[in-house]
Amino acid sequence: MKHYDVIVIGGGIVGLSSAYYLGKAGKSVLVLDKGNGTDGCSFGNAGYVSPSHFIPLSSPGIVSKGLKWMMSSDSPFYLKPRLNLDLARWGWQFMQHATDQHVSASKKLLADLSILSRSLHKEIAEELKLNFREEGIVMLCNTEKTLKHEIEIGEMAADLGVPAKTMSMNELDALDPNVKKNALGGVFFPQDAFTDPKIFMKQLPSLLKPLDVTIEYGAAVTKFNNVGGKIQSVQANSIDYSADQFVMAAGSFSPPLMKKLGLRLLLEPGKGYSVDWVNPASMPSVSYIFVEARVAITPLADRVRLAGTMEIGGLNEHVNMTRAHGFLRSIQNYFPDYEFEKIKDLPIWAGLRPCSPDGLPYVGRTRKYKNLILATGHAMLGFTLGPATGKLVMEIALEEKTSLEIGMLSANRY
Ligand SMILES: Cc1cc2nc3c(=O)[nH]c(=O)nc-3n(C[C@H](O)[C@H](O)[C@H](O)COP(=O)(O)OP(=O)(O)OC[C@H]3O[C@@H](n4cnc5c(N)ncnc54)[C@H](O)[C@@H]3O)c2cc1C
């Protein structure tokens, strides 16, 4: 049986990006994934590569808004109350971090990580000849209060090296004349980009082929063999695979695996839905976020992808139709031609975002096992940050200086 330099558990965007940069650095890598490489959170997301998203999920106002939303069965954010100690710990840490101080402390790192990742995405897209669309994202608002707040975020963005422009409705219509809009105005982030995540994920393995990287699908890791603070091997399908180092990149499925290693990982799955509308009523020329409704609209080749909801409700991909219809119904409040009747029967995809309580990913070695690198917890930013995370994982594995100072992403912070 071959012994590898590194075994990566999980073949989503974080796992495959890690394998890519490790392989490019000359390491022999095995990626083990329980799926078949055609679906999962990294495939059906909105495809934004968005430096504009530097405010972590745990931010001021989210707790009171969340409590209000919890009273409504079709709201965009929902935390299902459960008697579970890990959820209670997660919720407590989430509330502790929903502060201005936390936003101030983390926004620069999130912006820098996204800017780095955007440039890596662009390089990968060029190698794969993918349509990496650098056309920007509009944060579209239909209340004065949110518009004011978004303008403030736009001002913060400029200080972080992320260009932003406040736009009137006339300016937005000139930017994107294709779609009728019903809003008060918005903020345009011209450096945000987007691409079709499914195509990206299908093509990425072709970049790994010339490297010393093997991907095994249908290989769910079920067991670890450890000796003296080191992982020796993992087991999948009753086969032992050994390596010098291991990367945990199993997204929302990481906590039960970490538990097998005697490690507690504060991470909750945040379920979201997306719907593809082929030949939509009108095709936008930029992507949008409807701020109050928390909905993302991505124009892809022949379709728009409509994505939304954040449901903290455990490790299940069951579609809650009331909530899914809630987000689909909200779309016509911004794009009147996107009538609910036209989209309500389209197939609904569900994915689980791996959410840390402070809205920052975990990237780093664990204290208990020096040869285990944790790379997960990217929540709404995993597609954006996948390549940068992969590069950081490679640098950590090779014991090089990391491209950015990432002490705040420590795997041992809770
Ligand atoms: C509706 C929606 C819209 C989104 N939009 C965006 C967006 O526009 N931009 C953005 O940046 N992010 C977005 N996200 C978030 C993004 O999709 C995730 O953060 C990202 O996909 C997480 O990637 P990952 O590799 O960490 O996890 P995953 O993609 O979940 O990959 C984990 C992999 O681990 C494998 N695995 C699990 N258990 C095991 C095991 N025991 N053994 C072996 N393998 C295992 C799984 O099969 C899976 O392939 C969105 C998410 C949703 C749900």
Image (cartoon, helix red, strand yellow):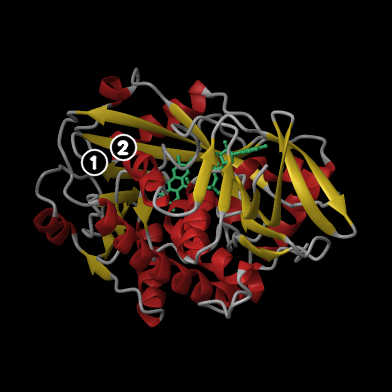
* Residue 29 appears anywhere in the view: yes
Q: Residue at x 77, y 65 (%)?
A: 370
Residue marked by disc 2: 305
Residue 185 visible, this angle: no
Q: Nearer the viewer, mark 2 or mark 1?
A: 1
What is the three-letter code of the residue carrying label 1? Leu
Mark 2 neighbour density, 10 Å: few (under 14) some (14–19) many (20 or more): many
* Sooner in the amino-acid sequence: mark 2 or mark 1: 1
Near-viewer residue (369 or 77): 369
Between 239 and 369, the residue placed more toward the observer is: 239
Badge 1 residue CB within 8 Å of ligand 1: no
Amino acid type at image mark 2? Arg
Question: Residue drawn 82% across and 35% down?
Answer: 83
Q: Position of residue 202 (x, y in %)?
A: 37, 39
Q: Secondary structure at mark 1?
A: loop
Query: Do the numbered discs 2 and 1 sit on residues whose CB atoms are within 8 Å?
Result: yes
Label 1 Cα crowd, 10 Å radius (few <14 / some 14-19 / many 20+): many
* For residue 238, above or below residue 300: above
User: What x and y, as percent, mark residue 77?
Assistant: 55, 42
Residue 46, horizontal then vertical, whole percent: 37, 44
Q: Residue furthest top?
A: 345
The quadrant of the picture occupied by the C terminus is bottom right
Q: What residue is pinned by disc 1?
A: 300
Secondary structure at numbered mark 2: strand
Front one among 413 and 207: 207
Q: Quadrant of the N terminus?
A: top right
Where is residue 367 drawn, in percent x and y?
A: 80, 66
